[in-house]
Structures are given as C-alpha cells and as structure tokens.
Amino acid sequence: MGIGDLTGDDLVKVLATLANPHRIRVIAVLSKQRNYVSQLARDLGISRALLQVHLRKLEAVGLVTATLELSEDGKAMKYYEVAPFALNLTPEACAAAAETLAPRDGDAGDARKEPRDG
C-alpha cells in the first residue's frame, strides 16, 4: 500500500489508526517477525484483549494481515504480520487526497450560512 493507492477517506483512517502508541509498537514488533497473539501480548506487555482491539483496527485499514494456523498439538493460532506499506506524506499527497474526500455535512453548497464580513 502506498499513499497514492488511498482515497482521502482511507488516508484519514490509516493516519487515525496510526495515531495510537500501542499500534505503533505493534507495527514495530511485527516488522521484525510475524507472531501469534499470546506471544505478541507478552512481548508488548499488554493484555490479549487490548491487543486484539488494536490488531483489529490495524487489520481493518490494511496495515497488518492475519493467518490462522494449527500448532503441533492441533490448537488454532492466529499469526499476524505487517503488510507492506509506504506512506510518503507530502503537501502534494495531502492535496491529492483532499480531492477524493467524501463531502461532509456543511461542505459545499452551504456558503449562504457563513457569516459575511463587513
């Protein structure tokens, strides 16, 4: 994933997802090697429940991927790894992304509601 592959709305979601220190730490650990939830939680020093919340958010925006595998004893284990991505955030990239943002309530067409000067 690169910044040019994202719509403005997708870019906002990715940046919002990365705006959390736990998620940055998850990306950092997974950038070294893929891992399963229990070991990852131990490595990060957080609960599995909290880790699951962060992993779901990272997976939802495409920053990590998961695969379900069977261990030697037949136990299902979910492994996570970082998905390849590069975000070169420049003013030009922001301008291009802004062109694809979905309109919000109060955007274009509501100019008459703006207070006038003078």
Image (cartoon, helix red, strand yellow):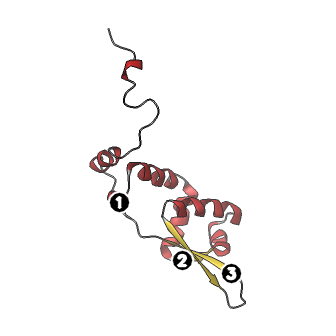
Of callouts 3 and 2, the N-terminal one: 2
Q: Locate the C terminus and report the quarter of the image it occupies.
A: top left
Q: Locate the N terminus and report the quarter of the image it occupies.
A: bottom left
> Residue placed farthest to the bottom in the image?
72
The tag on residue 5 is 1
For mark 2, what is the residue? 34
Type of the residue with mark 2: Arg
Of callouts 1 and 3, the N-terminal one: 1
Residue at x-position 46% and y-position 70% = 83
Image location (x, y in percent) of residue 84? 41, 70
Crowding near the residue tagged with mark 2, few <14, some 14–19, many ≥20 C-alpha atoms within 10 Å: some
**Dot 1 lies on which element?**
helix
Q: For the residues labelled 1 and 3, say whether their Cβ atoms are less than 8 Å apart.
A: no
**Dot 2 lies on which element?**
loop
Tell me the CA gap for discs 1 and 3: 33 Å
Query: Along the line of sight, which residue is nearer the eye, 106 or 62?
Result: 106
Image location (x, y in percent) of residue 74? 71, 88
For mark 3, what is the residue? 76
Image depth: mark 3 or mark 2 in front: 3
Quarter residue 106 falls in: top left
> Residue placed farthest to the left in the image?
92
Tell me the CA gap for discs 1 and 2: 24 Å
Image location (x, y in percent) of residue 14? 46, 55
Query: Along the line of sight, which residue is nearer the eye, 14 or 31?
Result: 14
Of callouts 1 and 2, the N-terminal one: 1
Q: Is residue 84 above or below residue 15?
A: below
